[in-house]
Image (tube, rainbow, N blue to C red):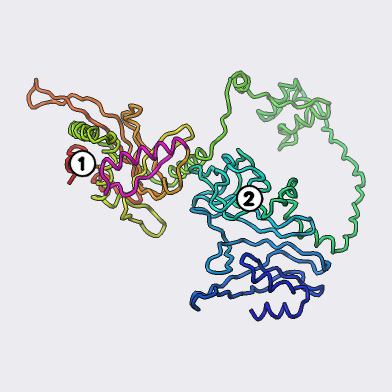
Amino acid sequence: MAYASHIINHSRKLRHVPRLMRHDHAVLVRWFSNGAQSSVCKREDVIKICPIGAPAERETVSKFVARTPVSSGLSKNNLSRTVMRLGIPMGGVVYNRELLCSHSQVLSRRGFASDAGLPPHQEIGMPSLSPTMTEGNIARWLKKEGDKVTPGEVLCEVETDKATVEMECMEEGYLAKILKGDGSKEIKVGEIIAITVEEEGDIVKFKDYSPAASDSGAPAAKDLAAPPPPPKKEPVEQPVPSPEPKTPKHSSSPSGDRIFASPLARKLAEDHKVPLSNIKGTGSDGYIVKADIEDYLASSGKEVSAPTPKSKDAKLASLDYVDIPHSQIRKVTASRLLFSKQTIPHYYLTVDTCVDKLMDLRSQLNSLQEASGGKRISVNDLVIKAAALALRKVPQCNSSWTDDYIRQYNNVNINVAVQTDNGLYVPVIRDADKKGLSSIGEEVKKLAQKAKENSLKPEDYEGGTFTVSNLGGPFGIKQFCAIINPPQSGILAVGSAEKRVIPGSGPDQFNFGSYMSVTLSCDHRVIDGAIGAEWLKAFKGYIENPESMLL
């Protein structure tokens, strides 16, 4: 504080700073005299601001570090715009380096009036809405240019790497300019997407606004103050005499002498009908190589035409096709699954389970559900419950690999694979081992509907510890092997149930039963073969004796 006061006392240009510091939403702007250095803030100024009526231990410290270079040749009326990251005022005038928006981090920058005539405004950047997000797409804007916005209102829908998330406004003002319209794709995190202003009358001043022109304001002022550099003298290129082509000496070899040449040279000479006897080889002992043939053809004025390779381009040209652009979820799914297959040592364990008792229990439970007005329970709901209880019984499979340790989770959160028109989603059922079948069924249906509507939020799919993928019931797939969803260590692939003949004790005795094939994909770094087999044994026990799941 003493350092800031020293600057205020020694510069008449800072006479308005006390008023700016008293304002709740002011940001420290420093002017320098003509003798000031060309770079700002060799050290960080620390300003301690204590809320009125707050105890001393709640004293909040904010650091303001100017990063924009200021030219020492600026006139008195010129003010260089300082760009700073704003924070949410909490108990005083506190400006943090990042602005939080619900579950995301929204980058916003405050712009001050400059020589370009732009009024105070705020630049809104593409937010980071998930831990793995590096770029996003604008699905649609819910506000249009000129609309008034208030804190908590939804500005637009952003398509992230996993879902479409609503982006809320954090400050009151007017939406002056939309830089990235509906359908804009591959916008990097932090890239400016919109401009807001405080006064409605300032909207028209941002009609032709572009971030590049705004950000180049300070360097432009510095360039004006500096003297123009002397013009560079372009060196005059002097014509270089072209070397005369070397013409090989043609000599006729004596008749009867054998001519030595490489197979490629013989083929090239044969294609261009060049007698080898007219060519003097440059190889050892007069050996003729390909370069000798090419030099001879060049001196004779013939062009060496490369043989046309036989390709299928003509056939491909006649194909009728449509190029479908990658969606954001498709690109992320492709990269994560490729990473999984390249870095995780997969192995697979398959077992057949009898589901006769499971089907009988499901029929009884659905009768009770219909009588009470509840929703029906599916086979997949029972599979999720059995998998969760098996993970509780064999916790080694409820783990993930890191370079330093194996992390074993105490929560059993089951991801359920859901196929949609946009791609594959894996919403999560949290604490599935502690929930009833009715709760699991209702949650799965709700999340599946949100996935099809592309309205899942990060909390709907993050934090899973194990995945279940079922292609048996919906598609009738008998058996398949699924790819592990990193950083998890296992995924269960569920096939369809089918009737089978079971041999009896006698030669003419047999029974019928319904069997379902399931395959466990394991990360061998975490789950050894015996541990995976133990988990499948526990899972099979719950499926074949479903009453034990109720205990």
Name which quarter of the figure residue 284 lies in. top right
253 relative to 88 in the view: left or right: right
**Relative height, residue 158 to residue 102 (above, below):** above
Foreground mark, 1 or 2? 2
The CA distance from mark 1 to mark 2 is: 51 Å
Q: Position of residue 256 (x, y in %)?
A: 73, 23
**Does residue 524 show up?**
yes
| Residue 230: % across, % down | 90, 59
Label 2 sits on a secondary structure element that is: loop
Predominant secondary structure in magenta? helix
The residues colored magenta run 425-453
Indicate the amino acid at tag 2: Glu
- What amino acid is at disc 1? Tyr
Residue denoted by label 2: 191
Residue at numbered disc 1 = 542
- Is residue 492 rendered to the left or right of residue 309? left
Which residue is most to the left?
Answer: 506
